[in-house]
Amino acid sequence: MKQYLSNKINDLPASATLTMAAKAREMKNEGVDIIGLSLGEPDFNIPEFIKDAAIDAINDNYNSYTPVDGYLDLKQSISNKFKRDNNLNYNTNQIVVSTGAKQSIANAVQALVKPGEEVILLAPFWVSYSAIVLMAEGIPKIIKSDISSDFKVDAEEIEKAISDKTKMIIINSPNNPSGSIFKFEELNKIASVLIKYPQIFVLSDEIYEHINYGVKHVSFASIAGMYERTITVNGIAKAFAMTGWRIGYLGAPEWIAKACTKLQGQVTSGANCIAQKATIKALTESPKKINYMIQEFKERKNMIIKLLSEIKGFKLNNPDGAFYVFPDISYYFGKEIAGKIINSASDFAMIILEKAHVATVTGDAFGCPKNIRISYAASQENIKEAVNRIKNLLN
C-alpha cells in the first residue's frame, strides 16, 4: 500500500528512539525480561504539588477548549520563568504553548524554513530535528563531532557550513544524546559568527536546562545580538517528570510567535487544559523543589560511567547534563558477537537488545555512527543489571 501514501510520508524516517522502544515492548509482551534504557523518560513520580494543582483544575471544572497559544495565566508564568531562570524578557504575546516541546520545534521550523533552505544541525543531534526539517522541505546540513571534542562543534566549523541557503541553526544544550553543555564562552563565539549573517535564525532547544551537574546553563537568546533572531524552546517533560502531560512552549520575536500560533491553529489548536493549569504550578515554584531528582540523576551518572568503563572497548566522556551516556563502541565493528558480525552501531544496539535484553538507541539516528545512547533515567538496580548483562554478552 506504500504507493498510496504521500512522498512526504514515504521519505520520512521513523523515530529511532520510538522504534527501539516499540521493539522492546513487543519482546516484553512475548515474556522477555527487557530492561529499557532507550527512552528519555524520567522514572520519578510527578511531584505532589503539581498533582494537587491538576486535581484543583479538574474540581474547578476546567474542561473547555483552550486558547490556541495557551492560557494567559500560564503564559505569564512562562514569562516570569524566563526572567527568573534565563535573564530573558518575553511578554505574553511572544510565547506559544504547544502539545510538547517537539511541537514547538516543528512549529518554528515550519513557520520559517522555505523549501530548499538549509538548517544546520550539530551532531550529535536529537533524532527528530532532521525529520522536522525534511517535513518543512528544508535541507538538514549536518556538522559532525565526536567524543574527542566532548561532542561539541566550534564556531569556525559552523561558519564553514554557512551558505547563501542557510536559514537556521538548531542548538541543543544540555544536549540529547551526549549530555554535553555549551559554556557561555563557546556560545558567545558562535554568536560572534552568526552576527555576520542576519538572515540566519537560531532555534535553542533548552528542554534539559535544569538537569545539569554544576555547569551553568546559558540561554542563547541572552547573548548580545541574538535575542531578535532566536526561538527559545523549553517544556516540562524532563525536569518535572511530566512526559505524558505534553506541554512545551517557546519564546520568540512576536512575529514568529504569531506565525507559530497560526500554524498550530490548523493542526492541534490549544494544548490540554488540565496539563496547562498544572504547568503553572510547576513553573511558579522554585526549581530547588526538583533538586532531589537532579541529585539522583547525578548519582546514577557516576555509577553507570564507572560500570561501563569496566567494559573493554567502551570509550566514554563525562557528561555535564541530561540523563544519557553516549559511548563510542566502534571497537566492536568487524567483530563477532553471539554469532553476528557487528558492522554498525545499529547492529550493536540490536544484538544487545536481542541477546542481553537491554534496549538502547543507535548513534546513527543522532548523526554519530560510532556511538549508542544509553539512558540512565532508570533505577540504580536496573542500571546495574543492564550493564552486567551487556558485560556478560561481550565477554
Image (cartoon, grey):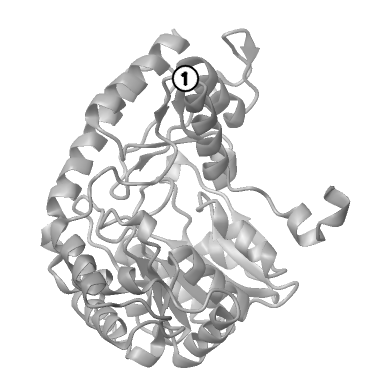
Q: Quadrant of residue 26?
A: top right
Q: Amino acid under label 1?
A: Gly
Q: What is the quadrant of the C terminus in the image?
A: top left
From where the camera sits, is residue 378 visible? yes
Front residue of 4/137: it is 4
376 to the left or right of 121:
left
Whole-percent x, y for residue 288 in the image = 11, 61
Q: Quadrant of residue 108?
A: bottom right
Whole-percent x, y for residue 327 in the image = 43, 33
Q: How many marks?
A: 1
Q: Is residue 38 above or below residue 295?
A: above
Q: Quadrant of residue 215?
A: bottom left
Q: Residue at x 39, y 46 (%)?
A: 40
Q: Badge 1 is on which residue? A: 31
Q: Residue at x 65, y 23 (%)?
A: 343
Q: Residue at x 46, y 12 (%)?
A: 394
Q: Is residue 243 above or below residue 177?
A: below
Q: Residues within 10 Å of mark 1 (few under 14, many from 20)?
A: few
Whole-percent x, y for residue 6 in the image = 81, 61
76 to the left or right of 256:
left
Whole-percent x, y for residue 106 in the image = 55, 69
Considering the numbered disc 1 on the image, is that residue within a helix, a strand or a loop? loop
From where the camera sits, is residue 161 visible? no
146 to the left or right of 378:
right
